Image: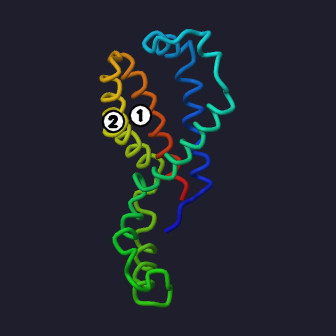
């Protein structure tokens, strides 16, 4: 089982694309800026090359990890990774793994299934992380839900792309 790096690269673009839409002033941008206490002048400051470059790097890390959230077949190999002969197609273990993948390798490999698991990750990972940090930073629930909504949609699309690109 190998990671599809083309799917990872495409998925890594999704946070930026959704961010351009989600945080646009005509969508949630004005509400987010108000909830964050950020002015338009502050938004224009900063080194945008660094911000987008590091954001893309973080998006790549997230896209790689999303593979393990949405593609169930990785779990089979993670259980057997230390078994001798797993990487040898001629060994008993290698043949067993090949037979397993031939029979079950495409199960649950759809955009819809990946989007479901991505959305679940947004709710059960992003919401608690955003919520805990935001509460201690004394942010509003509006702030929490704007960001969490973004991550639920973003992770759903990332999961869909990664899981659907067989």
Q: Nearer the viewer, residue 139 or 99?
A: 139
Of callouts 2 and 1, which one flags the residue occurring earlier in the amino acid sequence?
Answer: 2
Judge the density around disc 2: few (<14), some (14-19), many (≥20) Cα neighbours within 10 Å: some
Q: Is residue 42 left or right of residue 150?
A: right
Question: Quick check: marks 2 and 1 in contact, CB under 8 Å?
Answer: yes
Disc tally is 2
Pointer 2 residue: 123
Disc on res. 152: 1
Q: Nearer the viewer, residue 77 or 45?
A: 45
Q: Quadrant of residue 75?
A: bottom left
Q: What secondary structure is marked by label 1?
A: helix
Q: Is residue 52 left or right of residue 33?
A: right
Q: How far across and down, in percent of the image, does residue 29 sit? A: 52, 15
* Image position of 39 with respect to 141: above or below: above
Q: Quadrant of the C terminus?
A: bottom right
Residue, far right:
49
Q: How far across and down, in percent of the image, does residue 161 sit? A: 53, 47
| Residue at the (35%, 17%) spot, across then down | 139
| Residue at the (30%, 29%) spot, across then down | 132
Q: Is residue 98 left or right of residue 75?
A: right
| Residue at the (34%, 40%) spot, across then down | 125
Q: How far across and down, in percent of the image, does residue 164 sit? A: 51, 52
**How far apart, in angstroms, are the residues tagged by discs 2 and 1?**
6 Å
């Amino acid at each position: 089982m190998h990671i599809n790096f083309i799917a990872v690269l495409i998925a890594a673009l999704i946070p930026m694309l959704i961010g351009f839409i989600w945080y646009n002033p005509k969508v949630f941008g004005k509400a987010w800026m108000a909830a964050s206490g950020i002015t338009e002048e502050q938004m224009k400051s900063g080194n945008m090359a660094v911000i987008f470059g590091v954001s893309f790097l973080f998006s790549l890390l997230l896209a790689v990890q999303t593979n393990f959230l949405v593609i169930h077949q990785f779990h089979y190999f993670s259980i057997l990774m230390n078994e001798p002969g797993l990487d040898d197609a001629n060994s008993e273990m290698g043949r067993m793994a090949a037979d397993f993948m031939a029979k079950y390798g495409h199960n649950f490999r759809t955009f819809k299934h990946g989007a479901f698991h991505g959305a679940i990750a947004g709710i059960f990972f992003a919401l608690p992380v955003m919520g805990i940090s935001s509460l201690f930073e004394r942010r509003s629930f509006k702030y929490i839900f704007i960001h969490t909504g973004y991550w639920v949609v973003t992770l759903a699309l990332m999961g869909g792309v990664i899981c659907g690109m067989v």
